[in-house]
Image (tube, rainbow, N blue to C red):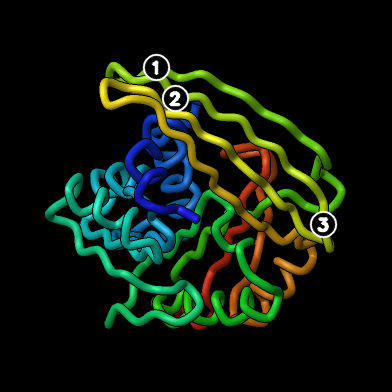
Amino acid sequence: MYGPEFAEIYDHVYTLRGKDYPAEAKHVTEEIRARLPEAASLLDVACGTGGHLRHFDGLFEHVEGVELSEAMLEVARDRMPGIPLHQGDMRAFDVGRTFDAVVCLFAAVAHQSAEELAGTLRCFARHLRPGGVVVVEPWWFPETFLDGYVAADVLTPDHRTISRVSHTRLEDGASHMDVHYVVADARGARHFVESYVHRLFPRDLYEQTLRAAGFTTQYVEGVPSGRGLFLGVKEGAWRP
């Protein structure tokens, strides 16, 4: 999952499929500052190749990123040499400081069990100041997941042609997605497969787990990708 072949084309695939990274970063920032107007620092967990992070960099005084995949980090480091980037697992990392905001987008938190989700959110809380804001994008809920969903695209960036065909199925209470890529360029054509498992956590599990980690919680429907966002404020902030 998220190997070097995919890291090379990741940004092309999602941008050309319509993902608006600048607009999403702006919206998330607005949600953060609606709860903490003075927010100046942000940690992007599961930052990938930096699609959102490079835009957060223009919206906050200080940003950092955490990513498990070394292949994705290599792309991010080339793109953003001035931003601190850390290789780490969202369930147990320590970057040595706290932030005004911690975000985890693109349903990355759903690549784990409910018990691991609880540990992840506690880890996020440890990296937030009192009153800091956490933003978590979920995967689909059980009632909104479409079993057997198929998607297909042909994309043509940088004198290359990329075909993407995906199939998603329900198995053992989780979403299993296989994505087939064929990439053709001057070097020839090559095929590879990326496979992902997302847990179909219900909405109330996210909310209960956020509260258990020490957050107030709110769910904002729809944005940015149709799945909505969970927002939490870390308890313990002083209020006049």
Residue at image location 76% in from the left, 69% down from the top: 205
Residue matched to label 2: 162
Q: Is residue 98 left or right of residue 79?
A: right
In the rendered image, the vertical position of residue 94 relative to residue 185, given as above or below? below
Q: Quadrant of residue 226?
A: top right
Separation (CA) of disc 3 from disc 2: 28 Å
Look at the picture and state if 230 lies above or below 124. Answer: above
Q: How many residues crowd around disc 1 within 10 Å: few (fewer than 14), some, or many (20 or more)?
A: some
**Mark 1 in CB contact with mark 3 (< 8 angstroms):** no
The amino acid on which the numbered mark 2 sits, given as a three-letter code, is: Ile
Residue found 82% across the figure and 44% down from its top: 144
Name the residue: 51% across, 77% down.
91
Q: Secondary structure at mark 1?
A: loop
Q: Is residue 239 visible?
A: no
Disc 3 designates what residue?
171
Q: Position of residue 170 (x, y in %)?
A: 82, 51
Counting residues from the N terminus, which is met first, the one under dot 1 or under dot 2? Answer: 1
User: What residue occupies the far front of the structure in this picture?
Assistant: 188
- Disc 3 or 2, which lies upstream in sequence? 2
Label 1 and label 2: CA atoms lie apart by 6 Å
Q: Is residue 72 left or right of residue 230?
A: left
Do we see residue 109 in this rendering? yes
Callout 2: few (<14), some (14-19), or many (20+) C-alpha neighbours within 10 Å?
many
The residue carrying pointer 3 sits among few (fewer than 14), some (14 to 19) or many (20 or more) residues within 10 Å by Cα, namely: few
Instruction: Please give left or right for residue 236 compared with residue 100 in the image.
Output: right
Residue receiving disc 1:
156
- Mark 2 lies on a secondary structure that is strand
Q: Position of residue 40 (x, y in %)?
A: 29, 59
Q: Position of residue 207 (x, y in %)?
A: 72, 67
Residue type marked 1: Thr
